[in-house]
Amino acid sequence: MNEARSVQEVDDVLAKATQTSSTNKANQQAQLIKSKNDAKNQVSGLVSLNNQQKELLLKEIDEADSEQKVQTALVKANQAQLVSKKTEVKNEINDLVDLTPEQKTALLKEVEVADSTQKAEAVLEKAKTLVQTNKTSKRLLLQQQANSKKIEANNQVDQLADLSDNDKNKFKEQIANSSSQEDINKVLEQANQLNNQNKAKKEKELVEKKNTSSSEIDALTSLTEQQKTEFKNKINSATSKEDVDTISEQANQANQKAKDDAMKAFNNQRTLTTTYLTDSLNDQKYIDGKTQLQKDIKSIDELVKESSSQNSFKYNEAKEKLENALTNAKKHIEKVNKANETENKLEVTKLQYQASLVHNIKNLLLLITGKNINTRFTTNPTAKLIIKNSKNDIVYFDPIIVNHIENDVFRNTETKIDFEASIKGRKNMEQDVEIDKIILEIDQEYHIVDLKGKTLKFNGTKTDGTVDYK
């Protein structure tokens, strides 16, 4: 305008300036409107602001008369968004149940210092990632704890002594499939219940088996009472049926061994006795000893013949009887040999039957001569006279001499045995009588007094008068 050379030029410059100013104002106004719209769009898109906050900010933007005021309102909006976002993030973090208190505190501090919503959201994402990590760790820990509980439960099942291996495996399979401690406890409860049932059943069966086995031991005929008591005490102390079976088997083996040992000892003694019979008693003068030993052997054989008698005690009893029989046979030989010594020989000089049926007199008379009769026989308490029929093994008289001195049945002297006795009342002499054997026996001597083949025959009821042996 200073360069204008005329009023018109001045007017033109002023008009042009006015036009330029108007244009600038219009441009500025348009830019302000655009900034406001952009700012309002940004505010509307701030998701962390509530409607009230947005309305206040939008109003402030609408009322802004300059670009600066619009930007100031937009800064306030972003600051409010950040504050709201932080609050939102903090709330979300606080609501995350799988964070530890320490983790939450650290994360909230990070949110507090965040200078943008992006950073605040990044902290939230970090928190969520940490939650997943914690969940995974917790799940692994729970799984480890569950596995540990299952291992512990399996160990408890293994300790149940009254479960079968099959039952244990079934319970372990149920434990493996359990998803909670409650399920595991239920399985353990079932396992313990079955174990207790099995235990009670086993205890009952064990008692029954003990009673049965004790009765069986009582029936073992070759064991002593002490052995039976010892085995039954062991059975009572047994803790399993297998132990009872083992003890019962031991008892049966001991019973069989006792029987076998006794039978072997008996058979050995019988062999010894029969050998003595055949080798040492063949001389005719030992005939009574041989006959007696044969009778003894036969009687003893009958003792063990029955199966019910074949036990250690019967065999031991039979063996003892064989030993006694053999001892008696040997003693018999000694006594016969002693009797056959010259100074000890005896001779029958009278064997007579005298009867008077009218006077009811029936007497048997016997006279035997020898040396030292009184010393050897009359005063010897073991001295015995036997008058018999050897063919039919009938004994007519067998008095102990010393017991019949006072009643005059014997009227002995130093050189004779004088026997006279009535046959009245003797059933085996009220018929035909035949006396063919006279025996005199003391503890040191055994005499079969030689009748030289003669016999005395009569009828104890009918014969009258005197009859001599012939």
Image (tube, rainbow, N blue to C red):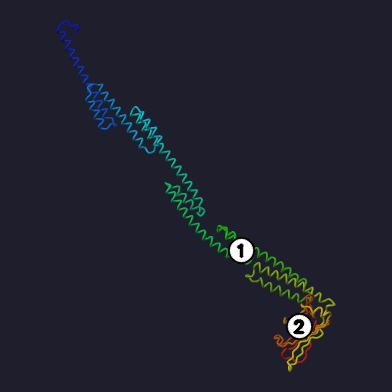
Q: Quadrant of residue 383?
A: bottom right
Q: Quadrant of residue 465?
A: bottom right
Q: Is residue 142 left or right of residue 346?
A: left
Q: Quadrant of residue 238?
A: bottom right
Residue 407 picture location, percent across and down: 76, 85
* Residue at the farthest top position: 5
Q: Is residue 413 left or right of residue 228?
A: right
Residue 163 picture location, percent across and down: 50, 54
Q: Nearer the viewer, residue 38 or 390?
A: 38
Q: How many other residues sit within 10 Å of disc 2, few (<14), some (14-19) or many (≥20)?
A: some
Amino acid type, callout 2: His
Q: Is residue 104 left or right of residue 446?
A: left
- Residue positioned 69% across, 74% down in the render: 299
Pick the quarter of the image with the N terminus: top left
Picture disc at residue 229: 1
Picture disc at residue 404: 2
Residue 184 picture location, percent across and down: 44, 49
Amino acid type, callout 1: Thr
Q: Secondary structure at mark 1?
A: helix
- Residue positioned 65% across, 71% down in the render: 305
Between marks 1 and 2 in the image, the one whose residue lies nearer the viewer: 2
Q: Earlier in the sequence, mark 1 or mark 2?
A: 1
Pick the quarter of the image with the C terminus: bottom right
Q: Nearer the viewer, residue 393 or 368?
A: 368
